[in-house]
Amino acid sequence: MNALEVGSEHLGTVELRIPSKPEWVAVARLAIAAIANRQPFSVEEIEDLKLAIAEACTLCITQVPGSETIDIICEATTSQLRIEVRDERYRARGAGAGRTASAGDGEGLGIFLIQALMDSLEVNIDPQLGTELVMTKRIGS
Amino acid sequence: MDIKVHVRESDADAYVVELGGEIDVYTSPKVKDAITDLIDQGHYNLVINLEKVRYIDSTGLGVLIGGLKRVREHGGTVNLVCTNPQIKKIFDITGLVKIFGIFDDEAGAKKALA
């Protein structure tokens, strides 16, 4: 669990593993909506989260094809939702691998949308090592 | 998860692609196929009706941008019908409001093609 913000209370951690295939991205969207519903996110914020998680999963599937699964780890607190999304190969190599990508690196609209909808985003994409995104959305932001 | 694609001929030498459901990495190939088929048949003025679309992501946007690029090569255009605030927000964020004609109803989108 990551350090909590002052005055913030940990509500729960949810871990989900989905097949790294397009037809399973909708499951990630539904799961995020269900988790965010346990927090006081607005309907619009929940829609933002659904799009962000879908874009993250799509990046895992399309940028570095070949992984079997995608891991999604959600840490819900009273102030925010932190989401880690990483593919199987990145998980095997461990944190710190790969490079940091940005919207200008050619990953296109997906990263741009996540940056616009979330409050923070870290991206590591490496053609050999896999993909990892860590993003946070604060409640009421 | 589903996507419904309905193509119909309209007046003013235009075709309407009516979409319903969710457009994401799984369903967008079906949308791309419908738009590509129309362009391959020589139809370059398109109205894409997103009124019944509940969700669209970057792969869906990519399909719409690809279609617009292709019809513009032939002097055509793509106008969108969109009333869903969440989807309009995505077009705003990405700046695509400046590239597509976006209308509140199909009549307006078709009229603007003429």
Image (tube, rainbow, N blue to C red):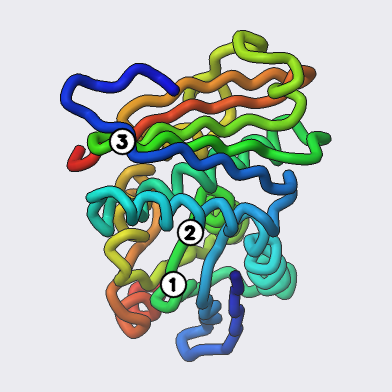
User: Quick one: label 1 or label 2, which is nearer the N terminus?
Assistant: 1
- Foreground mark, 2 or 3, reads 3
Instruction: Give the class, few, some or many, for how many residues have Cα within 10 Å of label 3's Cα (few <14, many ≥20).
Output: many
> In the structure shown, which secondary structural element does the residue marked by tag 2 occupy?
strand
Quick one: quadrant of the N terminus of chain A? top left
Given residues A78 and A21, the one toward you in this image is: A78
Q: Position of residue A7 (x, y in %)?
A: 16, 25
Between B5 and A12, the residue placed more toward the observer is A12
Callout 1: SS = strand
Residue type at tag 2:
Ile
Q: Are marks 1 and 2 on the same chain?
A: yes
In percent of width and height, residue A127 lies at: 75, 21
Q: Same chain for marks 3 and 1? A: no
Query: Which disc is residue B56 wearing?
Result: 2
Q: Is residue B66 above or below residue A90?
A: below
Say the numbered circle drawn on residue A77.
3
Three-letter amino acid code of the residue under disc 3: Thr
Reading the image, the residue beneath label 1 is B50
Q: Is residue B69 above or below residue A7?
A: below
Crowding at mark 1 (Cα within 10 Å: few <14, some 14-19, many 20+): many
The Cα–Cα distance between marks 3 and 1, rounded to whole angstroms, is 35 Å
Q: Which residue is located at x 42 percent, y 57 percent? A: A34
**With B9 as the anchor, is A62 left or right in this view?**
right
* Chain for disc number 1: B
One can see residue A38 in this view: yes
